Amino acid sequence: MNDGRAVGPRSVGPGTRRWLFVGAAAMIAPLGGCRGALDAGGPSGDPPVARDAAEPVLASPNELARSPERYDHRKVRVYGFCSMTFEGTAIYASPEDYRAAKTREAIWLDVDLTEGLRGMHERKVMVEGVFDKTLRGHLQLYGGALHVERLEPWDDRVENGATRRAP
């Protein structure tokens, strides 16, 4: 029943307001632990943040797939053979692995497939990005994913008198 007094925040005494504040703070405090999940590419859908933003760590697609914990959320540089098809953007260790469809040893490339990137299909490439062991690509077929920051063709032909090879 309403006896004519106002109902709402002003009708609550100072002691009750204090307990409401303490209760709200107690409910919100545990959410502070979610920050790490968001940094790791959690519910927000954002890519994970690299643990160290310095030089990328050099790794092969096979190394990433076989030791995902070692590289998780680290910035890496990977050399390999690229597939740029719908539901098949990935980097493989070799053309032979690509042709044999060894997707568990390949790494999904988390990148928007544009016409420019389609030109990288079935080419040797160098990719840099942040590795995510939990994202495994289309139908969870791949050994992890790279949130691509840089992707370039890689050629091991002779250039300026020196042979360029993937380290």
Image (cartoon, rainbow, N blue to C red):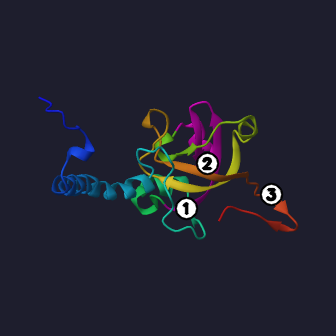
Kind of residue at badge 2: Ser
Q: Which residue is mark 3?
A: 157
How far apart marks 3 and 2 lie (CA) works out to 16 Å
Q: Do the residues under discs 2 and 1 have CB atoms within 8 angstroms?
A: no
Give the residue displayed 58% in from the left and 70% down from the top.
54
Left or right of residue 51: residue 36: left
Left or right of residue 80: residue 47: left
Q: Which residue is mark 2?
A: 94
**Secondary structure under the numbered disc 3 in the rendered image:** loop
Which of the 4 image quarters holds residue 33?
bottom left
How far apart marks 3 and 1 lie (CA) works out to 27 Å
In the rendered image, residue 13, in percent from the top left (x then y), is placed at 18, 52
Image disc number at residue 98 = none
For the image, the number of numbered tags is: 3
Quadrant placement of the C terminus: bottom right
Depth check: 5 or 139 in front? Answer: 5
Relative to 119, does residue 149 appear above or below in the rendering?
below
How far apart marks 2 and 1 lie (CA) works out to 22 Å
Span colored in magenta? 74-101
**Secondary structure under the numbered disc 2 in the rendered image:** loop
